[in-house]
Image (tube, rainbow, N blue to C red):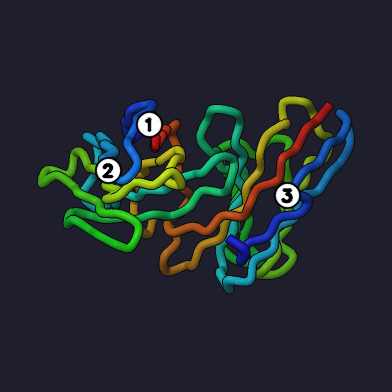
Amino acid sequence: DAKTTQPTSMDCAEGRAANLPCNHSTISGNEYVYWYRQIHSQGPQYIIHGLKNNETNEMASLIITEDRKSSTLILPHATLRDTAVYYCIVMNYGGSQGNLIFGKGTKLSVKP
Amino acid sequence: DADVTQTPRNRITKTGKRIMLECSQTKGHDRMYWYRQDPGLGLRLIYYSFDVKDINKGEISDGYSVSRQAQAKFSLSLESAIPNQTALYFCATSDSTIRETQYFGPGTRLLVL
């Protein structure tokens, strides 16, 4: 019953932009797209979220397609410390549970 | 995140033993969560609590119980540990107004022999 589809793994050269795709073709109008990452066995870390407009913060940018069926997380200048598993999560903001449903994510490897 | 602490960080126990994992937070959040992660898999929700008097089962609550002793403390108990409860356990917190932005503790690695 996964709501999102992500590639299993990706590589990126250090200093280059890392573009992580996520498909969420069944997203509904009141669902947000959230991104978290988990650096090896540490607790997951919130990165960014958005509804339909593109968003940017100090960590990353989130580009959501106009039909909202897919999105891309962009790390503009990837470093070795960005090597992690990245999770794309679709969630109803203000939903009754508020719990995050994690899939398997994308393992991003940043290489020197 | 140092605002969310978990104890112990590592624990080895035997089948049938009762153990408790503890979580404390200084973020002032009202909502707290317990997740478990198995190797190569994403996190799965065990229990969550929206305030001191509120406890809710998550996706995989069987074999676990929780106690919300105070707003800042949320403990997870395994009444009779079994080997397939060997996993990495994470506690998380969120604010009621921004509940989907959750802050995770460093995790507790549990091995049940």
Using the image, tell me which numbered label, if any, was put on residue A16.
2
Three-letter code, disc 1: Ala
Q: Residue at x 49, y 44 (%)?
A: A38
Give neighbour class at mark 3: few <14, some 14-19, many 20+ (Cα, 10 Å).
many
Q: Mark 1 lies on which chain?
A: A
Report the mark closest to the observer, 2 or 1.
Answer: 2
> Circle 3 sits on which residue?
B76
Position in image of residue A107 (x %, y %)? 42, 33
Q: Position of residue B59 (x, y in %)?
A: 55, 38
Inspect the image, locate mark 2, and give the three-letter code of the amino acid beneath it: Arg
- For the question of whether residue A108 can be seen, the reply is no
Camera-side mark, 3 or 2: 2
Q: Where is residue B31 in the image (x, y as percent from the top left)?
A: 56, 63
Residue B63: quarter of image: top right
| Distance from the alpha carbon under mark 2 to that under mark 1 | 30 Å
Q: Position of residue B72 (x, y in %)?
A: 67, 68
When asked about the image quadrant of residue A53, the answer is bottom left
Say left or right for B95 vs A6.
Answer: right
Chain letter of the residue beneath label 3 in the structure image: B
Q: Which residue is denoted by mark 1 in the rendering? A: A2
B60 vs B54: above or below: above
> Are dots 1 and 3 on a single chain?
no
Q: Dividing the picture into quarters, in which one does residue A18 lie?
A: top left
Type of amino acid at the residue the image marks with label 3: Leu
